[in-house]
Image (cartoon, rainbow, N blue to C red):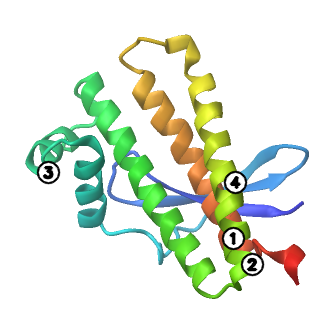
Amino acid sequence: PGCIAVEYRNPDYMTYAKDQYCWEGRWVFKGSLPSPTGATAPSDSDVLATLSARSLIPVEELQQLLSDCERTQLNMNICAFRDFVAADLELAAVLNARQASASPACQAQIRRTQADWEAEREGTCKEEAKAHEGGSMRPMLISTCKTAATRIRTRLLQEADPCLAEQ
């Protein structure tokens, strides 16, 4: 029960927007909010370096692919993966901050629930893209799904105590 704000990169790939979702038996869109400050948003250089490490594509080649996200399906796939990497880095920062101030029991609980959530996210996103198995847009669909889920998870962790039951 409650509402969360989800930040995402706008289609211009330069600015961010923030939407509000409330739980009503499922997440329901309630509207857009003023632009966020992005305090935990990773830097573009961190995103690019991590994207290069995860994709095994050199930074120079990635910069070229990311310069036109609508040019080819490969460009779209890489841009969607970049958005996921940015969301994943932000989630990691929030998790690290939560764990830094948590008791050892809470840290273990956070690790367990995060691992369970990641497994569920992977399964859900693969299932959502199943109709496009073998297709060139499947990686983009998976990345987009994972980005949305990761942003929601990040906001939930920012706004709720992950170890409330321990207190």
Mark 1 and mark 2 residues within 8 Å of each other at the beta carbon:
yes
Give left or right: position of 158 versus 126: right
Residue 13 appears in the figure? yes
Quadrant of the rendering where the C terminus is positioned:
bottom right
Q: Earlier in the sequence, mark 3 or mark 1?
A: 3
* Left-right relation of 137 to 47: right
- In the rendered structure, which amino acid carries the disc numbered 1? Ala
Q: Nearer the viewer, mark 3 or mark 1?
A: 1
- Whole-number angstrom distance, CA of label 3 to CA of label 1: 35 Å
Give x and y (percent) for residue 95: 57, 71
Q: Which residue is mark 4?
A: 31
Residue sitting at 85 percent across and 63 percent down? 2
The count of marks equals 4
Q: Name which of mark 3 and mark 2 comes first in the sequence.
A: 3
Note whether 26 is above or below 134 in the view shown.
Answer: below
Which comes sooner in the sequence, label 4 or label 3?
Answer: 4
Tag 4: residue type? Gly
